[in-house]
């Protein structure tokens, strides 16, 4: 090859590489974005969300809770420190958490909400609801500010908090749907300002649902409602970012990936399938304002009414690797991804969700831990499990049990054993009102007695025991029923 041709090839390859680097930088540089939103891509990188909502017969939603005492119990006993530490292990950069949606119950305290609550729905529509003491107004506020406590705990772990709430007052809190939706000043000014000022910089962002209902009137009148909302959230944190949901298909197939107002810092992103892969971090929104690309979908299988959002009773929709790969591809194109993860009412994560989300963290390099991502999950019907006693099986449980099947026994002293080679063992099962204590043994040595009882509701795939420092050799796990009506075998994780 002559020197001229060789030099030409070198110049071509150099130009190609430089062009590729420039294009990649242009896709992800974020030039022109508002400074307060840059943390989403630069620091947090990706995140998760939870539809942590009561509702029950008020619209058959998410957690089937209409009873105030039960809702207050789960809000009061949510272990925010444990949750935040686990989220850190997963490599999560931000958490989106619901304040409320449409059904009245909040995840926080609020005197303003109390002052404007309607009377309780009928006992048939909302059994267990109650009025505030000395009034005929429903008590929809718990005794604890869960959002505030969770945001503080997450902040200590370096994780941002985004809160989710509709732009309008709950439209089903009377038990019947109210139309058109209402957005009085006590809500968009007093209530939102009070929360924003209470939480301050512990809450980094807000995501408002339902804006498709007033999109045209807002645009035609220079956004009177959104202006009040924007000023309210900024009153607590001047750097707070804002996203607005204008629906998935209301205004065309790509409506989730653009903006329709002058305040949003990132796209609404909501989609019921895998979000599209972006080609640029910067999206030109309303009046060409530059905003951060954001894509968001759920990880549970589809429900006929609520898709997979918050669906704790449904199993996972995607293989772990698929959502990890999608997160990487979206990030390479400048996008921020969020994955809606169903968690139990007591705030614990089902084991299969832990494994999936930590897989994303490993793929993106936001965590080095693999305590869950590397586990092999062993279902209760595995032939290697030895059941001793009088056991029965249940399939298609519809509870969210791993692969929707379980083994269970009613006789104290019955047990099951599983032998494995490795250094880690994680035992997950349901906890429920009709379950009691179990004793766990490793290689014949008792590890203690563990409760599988919940006073109100069934929680699924809950980790009741884990050990990650075993000698890397063959071991035997044994679980023995001590008390309660049932002992349930569901899922074992080993490495």
Image: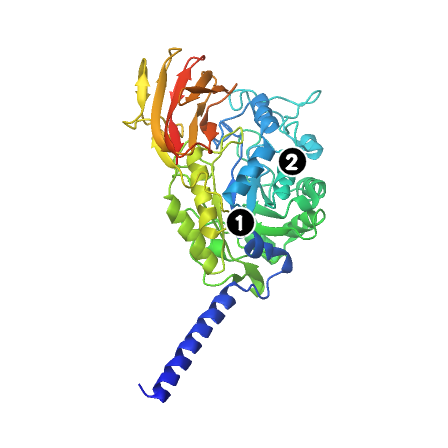
Is residue 473 visible in the rendered image? The answer is yes
Is residue 171 visible in the rendered image? The answer is no
Q: Residue 387 shows which numbered tag?
A: none
Q: Nearer the viewer, residue 486 or 279?
A: 486
Query: Helix or strand or loop: what does disc 1 sit on?
Result: loop
Is 432 on the left-hand or right-hand side of 135? left
Query: Helix or strand or loop: what does disc 2 sit on?
Result: helix
Quick one: quadrant of the C terminus?
A: top left
Q: How many marks?
A: 2
The image quadrant of residue 12 is: bottom left
Residue 167 x, y percent position in the rendering: 60, 44
Disc 2 crowd, CA 10 A, few/some/many (<14, 14-19, 20+): some
The image quadrant of residue 407 is: top left
The image quadrant of residue 442 is: top left
Q: Nearer the viewer, residue 193 or 419?
A: 419
Disc 1 crowd, CA 10 A, few/some/many (<14, 14-19, 20+): many
Residue 275 x, y percent position in the rendering: 43, 52
Query: In this figure, which colouring scheme has been used for the structure?
Result: rainbow
Residue closest to the far left: 383
Q: Residue 149 shows which numbered tag?
A: 2
Residue 296 x, y percent position in the rendering: 48, 48
Quick one: quadrant of the N terminus?
A: bottom left
Circle nearer the N terminus (1, 2): 2
Residue 304 x, y percent position in the rendering: 39, 37
Q: Is residue 251 above or below residue 370?
A: below
Q: CA gap, disc 1 to disc 2?
A: 26 Å
Q: Residue 245 shows which numbered tag?
A: 1
Task: Say which residue appears at 61% left-offset and 46% top-offset.
Answer: 158
């Amino acid at each position: 090859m002559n020197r001229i041709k060789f030099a030409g090839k070198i110049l071509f390859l150099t130009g190609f590489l430089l062009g590729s680097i420039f294009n990649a930088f242009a896709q992800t540089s974020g030039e022109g974005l508002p400074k307060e939103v840059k943390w989403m891509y630069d620091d947090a990188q990706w995140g998760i969300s939870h539809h942590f909502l009561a509702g029950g017969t008020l619209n058959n939603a998410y957690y089937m809770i209409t009873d105030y005492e039960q809702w207050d119990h789960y809000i009061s006993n949510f272990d925010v420190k444990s949750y935040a530490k686990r989220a850190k292990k997963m490599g999560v950069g931000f958490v989106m958490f619901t304040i409320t949606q449409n059904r009245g119950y909040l995840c926080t305290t609020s005197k303003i909400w109390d002052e404007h609550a309607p009377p309780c729905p009928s006992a048939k529509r909302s059994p267990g609801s109650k009025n505030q003491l000395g009034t005929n107004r429903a008590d929809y506020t718990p005794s604890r500010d869960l959002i505030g406590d969770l945001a503080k705990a997450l902040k200590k772990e370096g994780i941002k908090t985004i809160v989710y709430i509709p732009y309008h007052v709950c439209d089903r809190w009377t038990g019947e749907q109210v139309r058109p939706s209402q957005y009085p000043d006590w809500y968009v000014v007093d209530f939102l300002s009070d929360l924003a000022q209470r939480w301050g910089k512990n809450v980094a962002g807000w995501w408002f649902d339902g804006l498709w209902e007033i999109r045209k009137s807002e645009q035609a009148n220079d956004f009177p409602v959104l202006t009040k909302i924007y000023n309210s959230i900024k009153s607590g944190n001047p750097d707070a970012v804002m996203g607005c949901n204008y629906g998935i298909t209301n205004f065309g197939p790509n409506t989730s990936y653009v903006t329709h107002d002058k305040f949003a810092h990132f796209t609404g992103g909501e989609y019921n399938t895998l979000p599209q892969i972006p080609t640029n971090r910067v999206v030109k929104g309303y009046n060409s304002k530059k905003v951060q690309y954001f894509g968001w979908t759920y990880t549970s299988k589809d429900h006929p009414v609520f898709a997979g959002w918050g669906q704790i009773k449904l199993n996972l929709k995607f293989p772990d690797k698929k959502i990890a790969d999608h997160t990487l591809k979206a990030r390479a194109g400048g996008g921020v991804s969020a994955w809606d993860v169903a968690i139990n009412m007591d705030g614990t994560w089902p084991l299969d969700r832990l494994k999936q989300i930590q897989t994303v963290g490993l793929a993106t390099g936001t965590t080095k831990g693999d305590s869950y991502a590397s586990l092999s999950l062993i279902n209760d019907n595995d032939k290697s499990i030895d059941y001793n006693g009088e056991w029965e099986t249940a399939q298609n449980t519809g509870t969210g049990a791993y692969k929707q099947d379980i083994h269970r026994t009613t006789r104290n002293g019955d047990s099951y054993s599983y032998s494995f080679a490795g250094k880690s063992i994680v035992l997950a099962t349901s906890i429920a009102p009709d379950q009691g204590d179990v004793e766990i043994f490793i290689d014949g040595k008792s590890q203690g007695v563990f409760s599988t009882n919940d006073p109100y509701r069934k929680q699924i795939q809950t980790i009741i025991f884990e050990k990650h420092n075993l000698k890397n050799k063959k071991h035997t796990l044994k679980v023995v029923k001590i008390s309660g009506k049932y002992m349930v075998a569901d899922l074992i994780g080993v490495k």
